[in-house]
Amino acid sequence: MRTYRLVAIPGDNIGPEILESSLRVLEAVQRAEGNFALKIEKHDAGAFYYQRHGVRISEETLEACRRADGVLKAPVGDPSIRTPEGTEAGLLGGVLRVGLDTYANIRPVRLWAGLASALRNFEPGQIDYVVIRENTEGLYVSRDKGVGNRHAVADTLLMTRPGVERVCRFAFEFARKRGRGAPADGVKRVTCVGKSNVLKSYAFFRDIFWEVAEGYPDIQAEALHSDACAQALILQPVRFNVLVMENFLGDLLSDLGAATVGGLGMCPSGNIGEEHSYFEPVHGSAPDIAGKGVANPLSQILSAAMLLEHMGEDAAARRVERAVWEALKENSVQLDERGRALEGTEAITEAVMSRI
């Protein structure tokens, strides 16, 4: 019996609701597989924690995340709770990604069964690519470090050779191990996205990407400007397999991709480092529907599946993904035009668990 110690962070607003759904699914798949056990401890962090304690997350929780076999985090943040600088106080990205050195953010974009793409001319499974964003550098390295006054403000975009090399190498390795290429042509392809025709930092990223690509002759490499890529993700999403890019661009383009596959509520993510990892939905904490029982928990459930795969429990991860696919295909999951659960969070959770 393999045993894993997990940290769960309930987060803010809808966070505790959808985290509970994912934990119940994890319990179900643990029983169904019967060959591993999960020991889960909950730790509070986020906006409301900041409101009570003046910090986003405690040192004790950070240390627990470092010791854990994995971390499952729910959405955090609340627009009404701000730092003295005016930014959202509860966001944990800068703390966890840098503190745990989880340098690669994996954001799958997949059109699941039972869902209609906003692009309307694609079938389930035809859109299936992964955005890998560098997590610890780029423009977001200026989080809470911008300088200025009421006349001007500057935020710094920073890239280093070690940082770019390791995330590009991660992207090529991910494409090699993924087991499938782009839906349109089956080609294992890594696309570097930036704005190298305008900014030196993106040219720096692109040049290192080409250097790393030489070590992967079995993977097709290409580079696109970010504006051209945004257009292609709408017009030709089926030609993409793995995309790698700087932090800020990855944030934008992965959300664009989410809009083509049913919204952010269908998009999980993983933050991966050499020693630590954590998994979370792409979306925010949705304060407008908190406590109403209509949040879609699938992004959180699929994040739990990514956690299982990262720990080596591939069979359990596939079981969860199949359960989600079947629940959607059989119309047991009903979502409205804003991605909310028409029959409630509980109904979706039960639909997935019944197929585990």
Image (cartoon, rainbow, N blue to C red):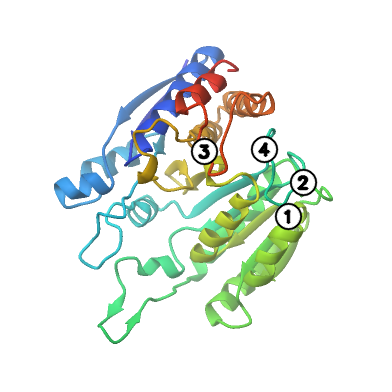
Expressed as whole percent of the image width and height from the top left, the position of residue 282 reads 49, 47
Rendered position, 10 above or below 104: above
Of the image marks 2 and 3, the number of the one nearer the N terminus: 2
Rendered position, 202 above or below 318: below
Expressed as whole percent of the image width and height from the top left, the position of residue 169 reads 61, 57
Q: Amino acid at mark 2?
A: Phe
Q: Disc 3 versus disc 4: distance between alpha carbons?
A: 14 Å
Q: Disc 2 versus disc 4: distance between alpha carbons?
A: 10 Å
**Residue 122 disc label:** 2
Q: Disc 2 versus disc 3: distance between alpha carbons?
A: 21 Å
Which residue carries the number 4 mark?
115
State which mark lies toward you, 1 or 4: 4
- All told, the count of numbered labels is 4
- Quadrant position of residue 245: bottom right
Q: Is residue 108 left or right of residue 81?
A: right
Q: Amino acid at mark 4?
A: Leu
Q: Residues within 10 Å of mark 1 (few under 14, many from 20)?
A: many
* Closer-to-camera residue (255/133): 255
* Closer-to-camera residue (217/251): 251
Of the image marks 1 and 4, the number of the one nearer the N terminus: 4
Q: Which residue sits at x=68%, y=23%? A: 330
Which residue carries the number 1 mark?
237
Which residue carries the number 3 mark?
299
Q: Which residue sits at x=60%, y=78%? A: 203
In this orientation, does residue 212 appear?
A: no
Say whether marks 1 and 3 touch (CB < 8 Å): no
Q: Amino acid at mark 3?
A: Ser
Q: Residues within 10 Å of mark 2 (few under 14, many from 20)?
A: some
Say whether marks 2 and 1 touch (CB < 8 Å): yes
